Image (tube, helix red, strand yellow):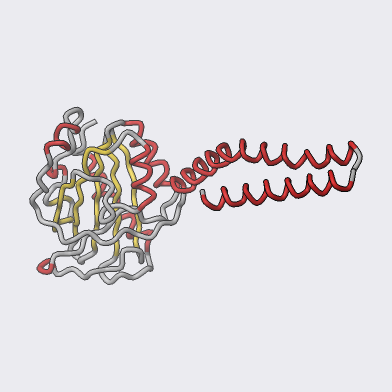
Amino acid sequence: MSMRGSGENLWEDFVREFEKEQAAEGESAAAAEQARQPERRRSGRRLLLPVAAALLVVAGAAAYALRPSDQAPAAAPAASDAPAPASATAMTAAASPSAFPLSVFPGQVQGYTLVAGVARTSCTGPDTVASTLAGLITQGHGCLGVDLALYKDAEGNQYNVALFTMADQGDSVHLVTFLGSHPESFQVAVHVPPTDSGLRRLPADRGRVQDFAAHGHGVLVGSAQWSDGRTADLDKLSERLSPLTEAVLTNVPA
């Protein structure tokens, strides 16, 4: 604001000096009209500033919501099998519908073993999602909670599954459409494997494949990484991820 005010004061001083010079030199009426013209442009500039500011705000929001490449969120802390306690406010907000329970994640399914799981009432924390997904959730009707789970298979490959409970089913479709169109953008954090799990801590943005699905109020984001973090054979890794996400989806109510 101070910069804009200073600019206008300088412009007004310039116009006054210009008019004085023209009056002293006895310029013609045409020249006087030319001297008044900058004043009208200045007034027009002042009126357009709020409009320009509004356009910048809208453009900034669009860029924020649609930016496809975010830095992957920080890895989530090692999770326990017990869900986090819900606050009274969150429980009230989740009354209809309610957040999915952590039990949607089966302990054993088709060769996958549940290693750790956690339920959170906040879906937009920096240790859970990257800024683009947080912005999309905030701009919609909100999220009632998110369940996060880490699975492994017999070879030690790691599978992370996040299930968001959206307040509005329309938001579920919107989020999956966006996420599916930017599969290279890692928007959901991965678990730090518990120390007794025998699993390696892998880079969150390397050799990682993703799977997305919407079902009712649920948005499911699955990801997988080879046990050694290699970046080869990612198509085969995607094939291994699909049965797990499909098994979880069968437990999600419509």
Residue 228 placement, left or right of 178: left
Depth check: give the residue in front, 65 or 166: 65
Image position, residue 200 (x, y; %): 21, 70
Relative depth, front residue between 177 and 188 = 188
Image location of residue 93, percent across then percent down: 19, 32
Residue 75, image x and y in percent?
Answer: 25, 61
Left or right for 62, reference 164: right
- Observer-nearest of 144 and 114: 144
Name which quarter of the figure residue 146 lies in: top left
Query: Which residue does the image show at 37% across and 65% down from the upper left?
Result: 233
Give the residue drawn at x 30%, y 69%.
229
Which quadrant of the figure contains the C terminus?
top left
In screen coordinates, is 169 left or right of 43?
A: left
Furthest toward the top, the residue is 96
The correct choice, above or below, for 14 with respect to 141 in the image is below
Residue appearing at x 24%, y 50% in the figure: 244
Count the marks. Answer: 0
Drawn side of residue 109 relative to residue 32, left or right: left
In-front residue for pair 77/20: 20
Residue 172 in which image quadrant: top left
Query: Picture coordinates of residue 90 (x, y %)?
Result: 17, 37
Q: Residue at x 18, y 33 (%)?
A: 94
